[in-house]
Amino acid sequence: MREMTFAEAVVEAYRQEMRRDEDVVVMGIDVKASLWGTTKGLHDEFGPRRIINTPVCESSFTMVGIGAALTGLRPVIQISFADFMYLAMDPLVNTAAPWHYVSGGRYKVPLVVEAYSGARGHAMFSHSQSPQASFLNTPGLKMVIPATPADAKGLMAAAIRDDGPVIYFSHRRLLAQKGPVPEGEHLLPLGRAEIRREGRDLTMVAYGAVVHQCLEAAEALAGLGLSAEVIDLRTLVPWDEAAVVKSVAKTSRLLIVEDGRKRGGVGSEVAAVVAEKHIDLLDGPIVRVAALDTPVPFASTLEAAHLPGTEAIIRAARGL
Amino acid sequence: MTAKRYQVTRKEALDLYFKMVLTRKTEARHEELFQKQVLPIYTHLSLGQEAVGCGAAAFLRPDDYLIGTHRGVPEVVGKGMSVTEMLLEYGGRRNSPSGGRAGLHLHSAELHILPLAGGLGTDFSLAVGAGLTIRNKGWDRVVVDAFGEGAAEQVDFMPALNMAVLWNVPVIFACCTNQFVEYHPYRETTASRDLAPRAEACGMRARIVGDGNDIFAVGAAMKEAVALCRGGRGPCFIEFKTYRLAPHHTGDQCGYRSREEVDRAWKNDPLPRARRELERRGWAGGKHFQAVEARCDRIIEEAVRVLLASPLPEAGTVTDHVYAG
């Protein structure tokens, strides 16, 4: 299969969907210039009515996207830095998420919010966060976070075709990473995890960029005689409980890894559900490896200390 | 002077008058049913500003979009929503369009009345988004975004006006300046007397209708704005000056204004004014007005009958419709 970068895969998904359905539009700050390369070339093909450069007003253009979605377009809103999703919190939480429910199913909000999250080195506290957990508690929002270029394409296409609001996170550190991507139409159903590596002794559940650290850790653990299964959640809402439970039933040990902060994190939810419903499957405590509960610091030593590293994953796995 | 083609016709004036009466009577009935604990949610009456509210919506086609205010009975009545539907929503009934989920948040996918969240000033960019759909689809529909002057202090106001002009979307921003923001006169928290200059500053066509209790002034301004927007020359901004005779909501003691001031304002009540003007023009008289009252009463009685006969939703439906797909 041909290889392309994560960003190129997103472009391919946009192009595929925009050619297929003229109601698909992409809006955001500098989508014409394409800060992250994920809309590169699309303005030339689709023009300013569908690749819509907005003013710097995340809250407002998110609401524009919602208004367009309610009336017949299928907009993708780009938030260049996921940290600024907090500016768009009210439109997403109070309008996009509830209205299908509040209208008894009569109004649909087919909106994708594509946001760039995660620390990538020296970007400081408000351009580095992984705010996924902040959106777990809002019913009505789905949430995906691909870890590979192929998934980036398949999940974006599926998110665009979903009839409700979907938050799509791209980890800033993955955008240039290359991988095989299927040609032609590629759709990945939302809500399905992927086993990235099979194992017998413990289950690692992760999402986004830390999936790759888990795979590195699993390789190192294999050398130590520990066989780790690595599950990439890919969709955080609704997350694939069945896949996690099936794996834990086999390994009896669960380690959850994320680069979001630990307190009230995605891992907290996964751990709570497994403990509440399946504690009989476990041979020991569920362990979470996550970012520290601090703002993201600047200096490289501090940033590394804030984030979950491969060594920490290995240590935690050995201690299970 | 309003161009002749935008002047309100007899048919339009009578329709507007009917909708104003229906609004007032429906709201009064809602208040009564709340006091009697038949309905669980209180009122935000539009008393005194029915001409602006009904007028903002009454000149739209069925396929045009409307976003009403939080004091929005006149707007949704103006757009043609049935009183039965409204009372079923207020009662949270199983057979309400939302199945007991919306309450005061009146909306209608069929009538193109767009949803409105509870936060004031969350409507502006939503309207721009609907305008963007119209632009991209090549439709000749328009959007009316009705709001009050208090909402115009919200963070989204200026960005929405800016985008509306940038993208030339057919949105009419209909500002109902009713002198009060919740529990205070608007000048306590708004530095400028008028809001329309803010729209002008964005390059938007803007005007002030100084007498928002005159159905003919309101109607002519709306007709002109709708025609301009439909012709691709939108967006427009209209600020209607009126007076909120109502308290902010049921139970508000209105300590922020004098009794005398409110009594004076009642002399400018848009309903008797409309009757006087219709009579002066020879377009309607006492018999017609009585017939309108009776027709509205019949509509409301039927709505109440349906409300009382309608059950609450089954608890088991609580998780329906959280996700669309």
Image (cartoon, coloured by chain):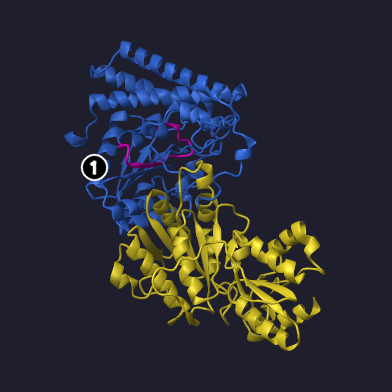
Chain colours: A yellow, B blue
Relative depth, front residue between A187 and B38: A187
Q: Point out the residue furthest to the top here.
A: B287
- Residue B98 in view here: yes
| Chain identifier of the residue bearing label 1 in the image | B
On screen, residue B66 above or below A178: above
Total number of numbered labels? Answer: 1
Q: Main secondary structure of the magenta part?
A: loop
Q: Is residue A282 magenta?
A: no
Relative depth, front residue between A83 and A220: A220
Q: Which residues are magenta?
A: B60-74
In the image, B238: left or right of A231?
left
The quarter of the displayed image where residue B250 is located: top right
On screen, residue A296 above or below B176: below
Q: Position of residue A129 (x, y in %)?
A: 59, 71
In the image, A71: left or right of A299?
left
The quarter of the displayed image where residue B163 is located: bottom left
Q: At 41% across and 59% down in the image, what residue appears?
A: A75
**Residue under numbered circle 1:** B227
In the image, B122: left or right of B138?
right
Q: Position of residue B268 (x, y in %)?
A: 39, 25
- Residue B158 in view here: no
Q: Is residue B66 magenta?
A: yes
Q: Position of residue B207 (x, y in %)?
A: 30, 44
In the image, B51: left or right of B309?
left
